[in-house]
Structures are given as structure tokens and as C-alpha cells.
Image (spheres, grey):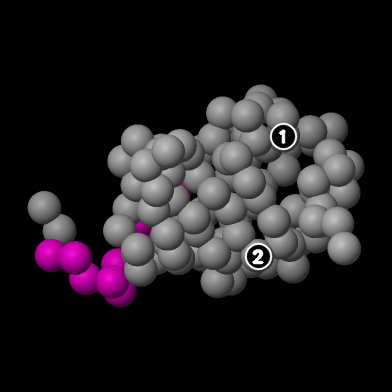
Amino acid sequence: MSNGRLESRLTINKEFDSFDQFIEEYVTNISQSGVFIKTKTPLEVGTSVDLRFTVIMDDIETIEGVGEVVRVQDDPPGMGVVFKELSSYSQNLITKLLTQHGRLAKK
């Protein structure tokens, strides 16, 4: 087992057939600032993670960056991850996906 060093990052790398599958099967909530990832084995709060989500839309698109686990919950099981670093392309892709699917937070 690891020694719990926060410097080392774990990688979350998933591929999905569509953005809808990404939301339904893996993510229950995504925003410009972070994501809630459904998992039965959440990581500890404070864990840094490399994020890479490949989503098939018109073309294959990849959202990638670095996040940090900020909360863990049991029902539904999973973890809240705040984005720490995203490429401008990934940030723009999230904005596009949220806008297309009506998921942007309303004012």
C-alpha cells in the first residue's frame, strides 16, 4: 500500500461512447469548477488526481487536467473533485458540453 504521500497523483482515465453516457454512468454533476465522480472506492480528501475523460461527440474529444478530491460521500458513493488545472481547450470543451446539454448553472 502507498505511504499516502500527497505529491504522487493517481490517474483517472475513462472512455465513454457519448457525453450522455459520461454523465449517466460516471459523473452525476459537472460544472466549470469540478466534477462529482461516482465510485465505490473513492480516494481520500486531499488526493491529487490526473483526469482524462475521452468522450465521443461529433469527434473524439478529451477533457484532461489535474484535480483534487475535496469531498467523499456514501450515498451515492463517490467523490467531489475540484479542477486545479485544465487546458484552455478542456475548459472550452466543458463549457460547450454544458451549454449543449443545458447543464450550466442558472443565475
Left or right, 47 with reference to 22: left
Residue that mark 1 sits on? 19
Q: Quadrant of residue 58?
A: top right
Query: Relative to residue 78, is residue 20 depicted above or below?
Result: above
- Residue located 35% across and 63% down the image: 45
6 in the magenta segment: yes
- The region drawn magenta spans 3-12
Of the residues shown, which amino acid type is indicated by label 1? Phe
Question: Foreground residue, 51 or 95?
Answer: 95
**Element marked by disc 1:** helix
Q: Position of residue 38 (x, y in %)?
A: 47, 39
Please report the residue visible at 43 percent of the width from the left and 44 percent of the height from the top: 78
Answer above or below: position of 13 versus 32. above
Other residues around mark 2 within 10 Å, as few (<14) / some (14–19) / many (≥20): few
Quadrant hosting residue 41: top left
Marks 2/1: CA–CA distance: 18 Å
Q: Residue at x 54, y 35 (%)?
A: 26
Residue 40 in percent (x, y) is at: 35, 36
Please state which of the two labelled residues, at mark 2 or mark 1, is closer to the viewer: 2
Q: Who comes first in sequence, dot 2 or dot 1?
A: 1
Residue 93 in sight: no
Label of residue 33 in the image? 2
Q: Position of residue 9 (x, y in %)?
A: 35, 63
Q: Which mark is residue 77?
A: none
